Image (spheres, rainbow, N blue to C red):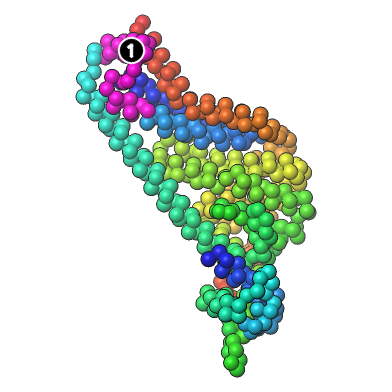
């Protein structure tokens, strides 16, 4: 389970580093996990990510082209929002060490956080 | 019966009076770890003394009676003109029922809380791991592509530190190191577990001041303890720089606003510049504090017993 999560993160990283939609083969080539992965493994991971709505895919000819549903920054804001919401339960997150920035920044953050899974393009 | 009542009274006295004493401690100077020990062990001591009192009520003849205790008991009986044993049994059973209720509640609350936290943490973590760049090393650090400087730690096996890239953009290297050391100290000191324990005890015994005030105090002390570790590794200047980036406005949640209060205290402590001793000396003083805190309800009970004796045998 943990290993699968690592793979998903690695695949998302590949998709975020590239602007173009990618085929499974392209993703496999770009992946740098330290060990050789099977084509079907990467396909399964992409399939999972698609089901979770983290990636979108489009059929061109016989192959699916994958791209991230949102940017790395949006993903970060989204996950932060989830954690901050959970910190109403303060054991989950012990301490926010730093909360800096102007009101404007905070408003920007808030609105960024409200937009849930907005398409990049 | 007298000893049992004295023990229960001792537990009550500690439960009501100790929070005031602990809160008066000068947090700018005292070792936060010592105070964490004092809070937690005091709670354990109160529970132990109360349990011992109830069990004594139920033990016929109260086990082996030292001559002094027998004398005290006789004196008290003389004053009382003898209390029928039925009352004793009844009180004991009632106490046992209360104690049982407390134990069951503590177990239920702890398990339920632990399960809920674990589930939520797993959800958060799977999302964070997907969104973040991982920096391996015990503990792992998850870097998020976010401009607002922010860092926190999440318990678990193993725990992780989460930090935003904004941290490295807005702070110098020393301050970033201080922030990360602070968060790592939370994980190394198992502060999440300490806070969760205090929360569970409060949930189980929500009417005793010692238990209601402990969670908040321990949260604050955990921050001070983590700062101490950060100061030790990165120096006070780096920690101060990091802390001063905290602005009073723009806190997006209640927990952040609460943290702000603690921030003033943390800065005051840095100004004071006291670093607690490390190693053996610290271990010894923690041990002494722990033993004292555990014994306190029993001591209070003994003092009460002595007072009763003085009053009734004069």
Badge 1 crowding class, 10 Å Cα cut-off, few under 14, some 14 to 19, many 20 or more, is some
Residue located 75% across and 60% down the image? B169
Question: Residue B57 location in percent, x, y?
Answer: 30, 25
Say above or below: B66 vs B142.
above
Residue B61 magenta-drawn? yes
Q: Secondary structure at mark 1?
A: helix
Residue B232 magenta-drawn? no
Say above or below: A117 vs B94.
below
Query: As drawn, is B3 to the left or to the right of B149?
Result: left
Query: As drawn, is B70 to the left or to the right of A65?
Result: left
Question: Residue A27 location in percent, x, y?
Answer: 65, 79
Visible residue check, residue B312: no
Quadrant containing the C terminus of chain B is top left
Residue located 27% across and 31% down the image? B93
Question: Residue A102 location in percent, x, y?
Answer: 69, 58
Visible residue check, residue B59: yes
Magenta stretch, main secondary structure class: helix
Magenta range is B52-80
Identify which residue, B114 or A41, lies in the foreground.
A41
Say above or below: B232 vs B1.
below
Quadrant containing the N terminus of chain B is top left
Quarter of the view holding residue B290 = top right
Q: Which residue is mark 1?
A: B70
Residue located 46% across and 21% down the image? B299
Residue located 26% across and 24% down the image? B88
Q: Chain of mark 1?
A: B
Question: Residue B56 location in percent, x, y?
Answer: 33, 25
């Amino acid at each position: 389970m943990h290993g699968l999560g690592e793979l998903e993160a690695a695949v998302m990283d590949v998709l975020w580093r590239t602007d173009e939609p990618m085929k499974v083969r392209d993703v496999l080539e770009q992946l740098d996990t330290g060990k050789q992965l099977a084509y079907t493994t990467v396909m399964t991971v992409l399939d999972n990510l698609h089901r979770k709505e983290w990636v979108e895919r489009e059929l061109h000819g016989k192959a699916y082209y994958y791209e991230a549903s949102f940017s790395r920054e949006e993903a970060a804001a989204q996950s932060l929002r989830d954690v901050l919401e959970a910190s109403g339960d303060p054991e989950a997150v012990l301490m926010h060490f730093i909360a800096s920035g102007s009101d404007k920044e905070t408003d920007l953050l808030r609105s960024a956080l409200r937009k849930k899974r907005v398409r990049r393009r | 019966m007298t000893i049992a009542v004295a023990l229960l009274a001792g537990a009550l006295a500690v439960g009501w009076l100790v929070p005031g004493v602990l809160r008066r401690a000068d947090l700018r100077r005292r070792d936060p770890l010592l105070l964490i020990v004092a809070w937690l062990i005091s709670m354990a001591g109160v529970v132990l003394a109360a349990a011992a009192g109830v069990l004594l009520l139920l033990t016929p003849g109260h086990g082996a009676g030292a001559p002094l205790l027998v004398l005290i008991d006789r004196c008290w009986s003389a004053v009382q003109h003898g209390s029928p044993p039925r009352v004793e049994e009844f009180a004991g059973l009632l106490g046992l029922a209360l104690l049982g209720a407390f134990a069951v509640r503590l177990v239920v609350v702890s398990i339920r809380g632990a399960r809920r936290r674990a589930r939520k943490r797993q959800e958060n973590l799977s999302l964070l791991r997907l969104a973040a760049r991982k920096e391996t090393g015990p503990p792992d650090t998850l870097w998020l592509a976010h401009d607002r400087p922010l860092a926190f730690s999440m318990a678990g096996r193993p725990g992780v530190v989460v930090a935003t890239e904004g941290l490295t953009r807005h702070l110098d290297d020393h301050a970033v190191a201080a922030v990360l050391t602070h968060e790592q100290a939370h994980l190394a000191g198992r502060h999440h577990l300490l806070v969760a324990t205090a929360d569970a005890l409060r949930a189980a015994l929500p009417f005793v001041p010692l238990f209601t005030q402990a969670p908040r105090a321990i949260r604050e002390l955990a921050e001070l303890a983590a700062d101490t570790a950060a100061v030790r590794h990165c120096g006070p200047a780096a920690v101060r720089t990091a802390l001063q980036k905290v602005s009073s406005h723009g806190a997006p949640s209640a927990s952040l606003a609460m943290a702000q209060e603690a921030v003033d205290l943390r800065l005051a402590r840095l100004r004071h510049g006291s670093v607690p001793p490390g190693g053996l000396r610290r271990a010894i003083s923690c041990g002494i504090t722990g033993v004292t805190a555990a014994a306190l309800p029993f001591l209070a009970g003994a003092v009460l017993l002595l007072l009763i004796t003085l009053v009734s045998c004069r």
